Amino acid sequence: MFKRILKILAAVCLATGIAWASESPFIGEWKLDSSKSRMPDEMKVESKGGNTYSFDFGGGAETVVADGSDQPGGYGGTLLSVKAEAPDTWIVQRKKDGKVLIRATWKLSQDGSTLTDYYRQFESDGSTTSLDYVYQRHGGGSGFAADWQSIKETVNSPFLMQVKEFQGDGLSFTTPWEQKTTNVKFDGKDYPDEGPNANRNVSASIQRLDERTLVITDKAGGKVAYTEDFALSADLKTLTVTLRSPGRDKPLVMVFERK
């Protein structure tokens, strides 16, 4: 009798999970409100002597000569180039298979205390993602060499996120500009990212804290890379995503409005 009761309870819990996912208030299309969002970024540039520099954009150091030539980068077979167009202007590009993926124009302020990054990301569908960052120098260094931490972020392009039902008892999160989809189920298991720009070394799991709060844990190589807290407003019209990374004291906060 006890085993029978356990089986019935398990079936009820499974049915409840499937029903919740199919009727989840998170499902829908969401548009970023950049005026309410805060997306701090940090990049480290270190002089290695001569015209050689080390760049760390958050995924590990990449060392290249700043002569404008394409050199092996540290991201999935990409090539990185850095060109000094003027004493206060650098052009940073990332390519793969002969195509430009990213082009950033860095402008150093006259006193060298701030750096403005005009970041452009070119998508496979022909669209361009445009963001402008203003960084402030921290620590030592001179010229472009410094620990740069952003103080202002401007999103010029529409930033959308789509949330759909996934296989009855899960949710699917897609960000079109990243061309990446995170499919997860409420079973505690890790699921790999999917899509043209997905990193097969990255996986995610999801946990429901209550009816309006979810937590996604993203892992890289089996280790926690960051967590994403999804919190819905009481009227279900606003979704706040807070991303926290180990070793970084400033979280990324994105506020979305339901379309």
Image (spheres, grey):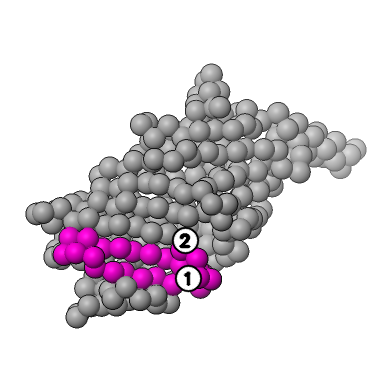
Percent coordinates x, y for residue 186 in the rendering: 67, 43
Kind of residue at disc 2: Leu
Q: Residue 103 appears in which quarter of the rendering?
A: bottom left
Residue 146 in sight from this viewpoint: no
Q: Is residue 155 above or below residue 42?
A: above
Q: Residues within 10 Å of mark 2 (few under 14, many from 20)?
A: some
Q: What residue is drawn where x is 52% and y is 62%?
A: 220
The numbered disc on residue 101 is: 2
Percent coordinates x, y for residue 259 in the rendering: 56, 27
State the residue lying farthest toward the left: 111
Sequence-first disc among 2 and 1: 1
Q: Which residues are magenta?
A: 76-100
For the residues bearing labels 2 and 1, Cβ distance under 8 angstroms: yes
Distance between mark 2 and mark 1 Cα atoms: 9 Å
Percent coordinates x, y for residue 92 in the rendering: 33, 64
State the residue lying farthest toward the top: 235
Between circles 2 and 1, the one closer to the viewer is 2
Q: Identify the element where label 1 is drawn.
A: loop
Q: Is residue 87 magenta?
A: yes
Q: Which of these two is toward me, 28 or 18?
A: 28
Q: What residue is drawn where x is 13% and y is 56%?
A: 112
Q: What residue is drawn where x is 54% and y is 27%?
A: 258
Q: Is residue 205 above or below residue 156?
A: below
Percent coordinates x, y for residue 201 in the rendering: 57, 65
Residue 59 in sight from this viewpoint: yes
Give the prevailing secondary structure in the magenta stretch: strand
Q: Relative to 123, is 120 on the left or the right?
A: left
Kind of residue at disc 1: Thr
Q: Relative to 75, is 9 on the left or the right?
A: right
Q: Identify the element where label 2 is drawn.
A: strand
According to the image, label 1 marks what residue? 78
Q: Which of these two is toward me, 149 or 69?
A: 69
